[in-house]
Image (tube, rainbow, N blue to C red):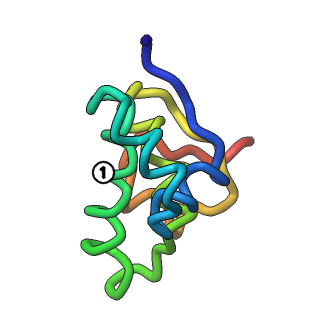
């Protein structure tokens, strides 16, 4: 299976350890699910210091993995996660 993007409903189920979703997760390649691990690590790193929330981390994760820019009005939370990949639309 190629790299994919997961909808936040799947990611939330994983964070909540929803049994059917966890069974599905166990059958997937690690590279597909690395976004979740990256997001959880960033949450631990930046939640208290920058007010970053889990949804910020989950949105930023595929951008980080794919090294794609993210256009957002939320530079306060996304710049600590993505650095120069976070942009505000002109």
Relative image position of residue 31 (x, y in whole percent): 29, 28
Q: Quadrant of the C terminus?
A: top right
Q: Is residue 23 positioned above or below 40 on the image? A: above
Relative image position of residue 4 (x, y in whole percent): 51, 24
Relative image position of residue 7 (x, y in whole percent): 65, 43
Q: Residue at x 63, y 62 (%)?
A: 74
Q: Which residue is situated farthest in the right direction here?
A: 90
Depth check, front residue: 41 or 81:
41
Q: Is residue 51 left or right of residue 74?
A: left
Q: Is residue 7 positioned above or below 52 on the image? A: above
Q: Residue at x 40, y 79 (%)?
A: 50
Q: Is residue 18 left or right of residue 42?
A: right
In the structure shown, which secondary structural element does the residue marked by tag 1 occupy?
A: helix
Q: Which residue is situated farthest in the bottom direction here?
A: 48
Q: Is residue 90 left or right of residue 87?
A: right
Q: Residue at x 43, y 12 (%)?
A: 1
Numbered disc total: 1
Q: How dense is the environment of label 1, judged by Cα within 10 Å: few (below 14), some, or many (20 and up)?
A: some
Depth check, front residue: 87 or 40:
40
Q: Residue at x 27, y 32 (%)?
A: 30
Q: Is residue 4 positioned above or below 41 on the image? A: above
Q: Is residue 18 positioned above or below 83 on the image? A: below
Relative image position of residue 18 (x, y in whole percent): 52, 62
The residue identified by callout 1 is 38
């Amino acid at each position: 299976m190629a790299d994919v993007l997961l909808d936040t409903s799947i990611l939330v189920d994983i964070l909540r350890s929803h049994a059917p979703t966890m069974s599905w997760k166990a059958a997937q390649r690690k590279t597909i699910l690395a976004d979740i691990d990256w997001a959880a690590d960033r949450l631990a790193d930046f939640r208290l210091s920058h007010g970053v929330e889990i949804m910020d981390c989950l949105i930023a994760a595929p951008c980080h993995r794919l090294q794609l820019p993210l256009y957002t009005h939320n530079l306060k939370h996304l710049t600590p996660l993505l650095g120069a990949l976070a942009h505000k639309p002109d």
